[in-house]
Image (tube, coloured by chain):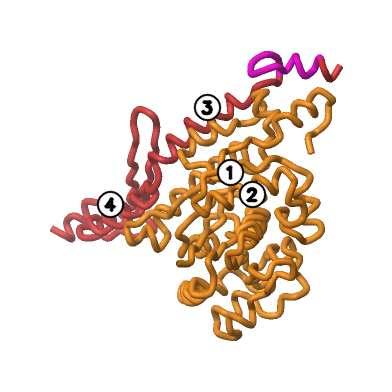
Chain colours: A red, B orange
Amino acid sequence: MNVFGFFRRGGPGTGAGAGTAPVARERLKILLAHERSTAGKSDLVVLLRDEILAVVTKHISAKPENVHVSMQCDDAISTLTVDVEIPGPVDMLLAANG
Amino acid sequence: MAKVLVVTSGKGGVGKTTTTAALGAALAQGGQEVCVVDFDVGLRNLDLVMGAERRVVYDFVNVTQGNAKLPQALIKDKRLGTLSLLAASQTRDKDALTEKGVARVMRQLRSKFDWVICDSPAGIERGAVLAMRHADIAVIVTNPEISSVRDSDRIVGLLDSKTVKAERDEAVEKHLLLTRYDAGRAARGEMLAIDDVLEILSLPLLGVIPESQEVLRASNTGSPVTLANPASAPARAYQDAALRLNGESVAMTIPGNRRNLFGALFGRRAA
């Protein structure tokens, strides 16, 4: 039976459960292509956050913990989201600065 | 001129300590002066695999902090006069190693030995970065398995950015060592094949170590596999890898092909 089992598993794609290595190879290739292209991007988000914070606080009083910067990467398009929480109505802040 | 080699992987349990001991012993058997250094502070195991666990008095941390001199901490192997061990501390954590202290000890080791082999802890944190910091050569230990390959790719990135060589715009010489390889399973498409891993990681191949009971048998008795059973398939693969590290060109043999086929036919795992 083992002998038949061996021949039945003769190669990739020749039976159920056999030849999962090609799947592993393709998954790895796709994953690593993505990870290599985004390597160091987390540092970019930190850098953007610091500089955006500097610009924002020059004009309005926002606390550092209320500035959120995040990046979403997809195949076709990447989105940079900047979220700044400002206490009170902006009109007043602008008036105070103006 | 001494060479500093780091055995690294990112992922744990792939065979870094086994490889450090086996390559260290193989190089020392060739007559070169070799020191194996355990960077896994807090989880030391190289002493155990080398069979020197009861001989550790002073450790790497003691030397980096100046509480012991290097010669006091070096443990000479009882089987090979050219092989020494610098054990990690078991009672401290990775923060006990300082960048400055490690740099000083590595300079001293370079002046005493032909090869300094650094056994890296798993992970990509401080301990792993310190282990690779002064390396001229890196042996990246990888299993033919997706998580190991992914982590190896991450380690390549660190070798290209966090080492002294990288900061000087020089490159650390990188080699892939594929361990726990089962040629039969790879042939049947059940396991990533050597070419798959090479294509994905784009690293030169230093050797292929077959999955083998000899590795556990050797560590059970506290002996590098290259000393415990020099004629076994994993020992011969490590000996060839050591020769390649010395610049010799040795034909790459993929061990276990025949026996794995035999094993498959009779429903047994190959030795």
**x then y, percent, for residue B121:** 60, 59
Q: How many residues crowd around disc 2 within 10 Å: few (fewer than 14), some, or many (20 or more)?
A: many
Q: Secondary structure at mark 3?
A: helix
How far is mark 3 from mark 2, CA to CA?
30 Å
- Give the residue type that dot 4 points to: Pro
Do the residues marked 2 and 4 share a common chain? no
* Residue carrying label 2: B238
- Give the residue type that dot 1 points to: Gly
Of badges 1 and 3, nearer the viewer stands 1
Q: Are marks 3 and 4 in contact (CB under 8 Å)?
A: no
- The structure residue drawn at horizontal position 40% and vertical position 52%, both measured from the top left corner, is B160
**x then y, percent, for residue B102:** 50, 73
Question: Left of A91 or right of it: where is A42?
Answer: right
Q: Chain of mark 2?
A: B
How far is mark 3 from mark 4, CA to CA?
52 Å
Quadrant of image for the C terminus of chain A: bottom left
Do the residues marked 3 and 4 share a common chain? yes
Query: B60 or B206, which is in the foreground?
Result: B206
Q: Are marks 4 and 1 in contact (CB under 8 Å)?
A: no
- Give the residue type that dot 2 points to: Tyr
Q: Which residues are magenta?
A: A4-16
Q: Secondary structure at mark 2?
A: helix
Secondary structure mostly taken by the magenta-highlighted segment of the chain: loop
- Give the residue type that dot 3 points to: Glu
- The structure residue drawn at horizontal position 66% and vertical position 80%, both measured from the top left corner, is B58
**Could you tell which of marks 3 and 4 lies nearer the N-terminus?**
3
**Could you tell which of marks 1 and 2 lies nearer the N-terminus?**
1
* Residue carrying label 3: A26
Of badges 2 and 4, nearer the viewer stands 2
- The structure residue drawn at horizontal position 73% and vertical position 61%, both measured from the top left corner, is B49
